[in-house]
Image (cartoon, rainbow, N blue to C red):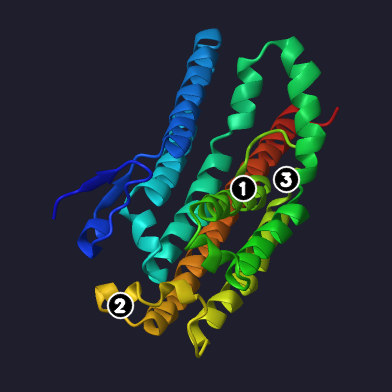
Amino acid sequence: MNVFLHVEGSAPTEPLEIAAAWHADPLVIVPLVLAAWGYLELMRSVNRRHPANRWPRRRAAMWIVGLVAIFLALQSPIDALSEQLLTVHMVQHALLTLVAPPLLAASGIGTLLLRASSPHVRSRYLLPLMHGPLAIVVHPIVGWIAFAAVMWGSHMSGLYNLALTDPTVHMFEHLLYLVAACFFWWPIFSPDPMRWRLHPGARLGLVFGQLPSMSFLAVVLLTAPVVLYPAYVGRAELYGIDPLVDQQAAGALMWVIGDVALIGAALIIAADWMRKSERQDARVDARLARSRERGPS
């Protein structure tokens, strides 16, 4: 099968072409390239200023992998096939909501920007912004509600079906998923000095609290007796798949991927909580040992 590359406005129409179509949309590629370049430039600046305290490469890797996940979701054949098959749409959703945002959050972009900035810029602009307007939109409760509302609102209204027929709405929908997911994941995984610093137990609560919402939505798709998105009728059949069967498979996929991602996130949080508790216990034991060595005063 030949890979089919198209610029916006020259979309493939044959099933095999659609299944192999890579996009070249400047509205997506240019921001991703600039985001990658900007992060790496900030990292180089920090490393030059602080050679003894260099920026962790693993955080840079998280940022780059997160951007790659967005690229694959929006520019690879996944995007073209998501308009033909709801199951592929679920894979796209997973990349935009469950893969890219937690990686971007864990990259520490805010902390990197603070370290790369001058003291004046840091104290006059960045910290007030992070503790002011941004503190509202990344409030844990706001993020939790936004994520659940976007997932339910898009799937249980006419927005999703409209996105299948209108490219502008489709682009808006993708942006909505990505932004809402970032609001949800940022308080959970970001190391940035945000106003809301959550205890690991609260972070676990946010993650587990999202499980019923996503699982119930998946069950709705899995058990619906009719096709919920008429735009798929006539498209899924091109691949020999009944649209209702495709919808049921998509619901099952959403259920599995959502649960695996959220439970996996909970395990990461729990493991980090245990490591921090062990380090704290070790520090307490060391202080007690030093006190015993000194003896009574």
Q: Position of residue 221 (x, y in %)?
A: 52, 79
| Callout 2 secondary element | helix
Which quarter of the image is occupied by the N terminus?
A: bottom left
In this rendering, is residue 48 above or below 14?
above
- Residue at 60 percent of width and 16 percent of height: 116
Label at residue 293 = none
Question: Which of the two labelled residues, at mark 2 and mark 3, occupies the earlier sequence position?
Answer: 3
Label at residue 179 = 1
Which quarter of the image is occupied by the C terminus?
A: top right
In this rendering, is residue 53 above or below 22?
above
Q: Position of residue 212 (x, y in %)?
A: 63, 74
What's the amino acid at mark 2? Answer: Glu
What's the amino acid at mark 3? Answer: Val
Disc 2 designates what residue? 237
Circle 2 Cα neighbour tier, 10 Å, few/some/many (<14 / 14–19 / ≥20): some
In this rendering, is residue 294 above or below 264?
above
- Residue at 49 percent of width and 32 percent of height: 31
For marks 1 and 3, give the CA distance.
10 Å
Asked which quadrant contains residue 6, the reply is: top left
Circle 3 Cα neighbour tier, 10 Å, few/some/many (<14 / 14–19 / ≥20): many
Disc 3 designates what residue? 138
Instruction: Tell me if 186 is positioned left or right of 77 in this view.
Output: right
Which marked residue is nearer to the observer: mark 2 or mark 3? 2
| Callout 3 secondary element | loop
Circle 1 Cα neighbour tier, 10 Å, few/some/many (<14 / 14–19 / ≥20): some
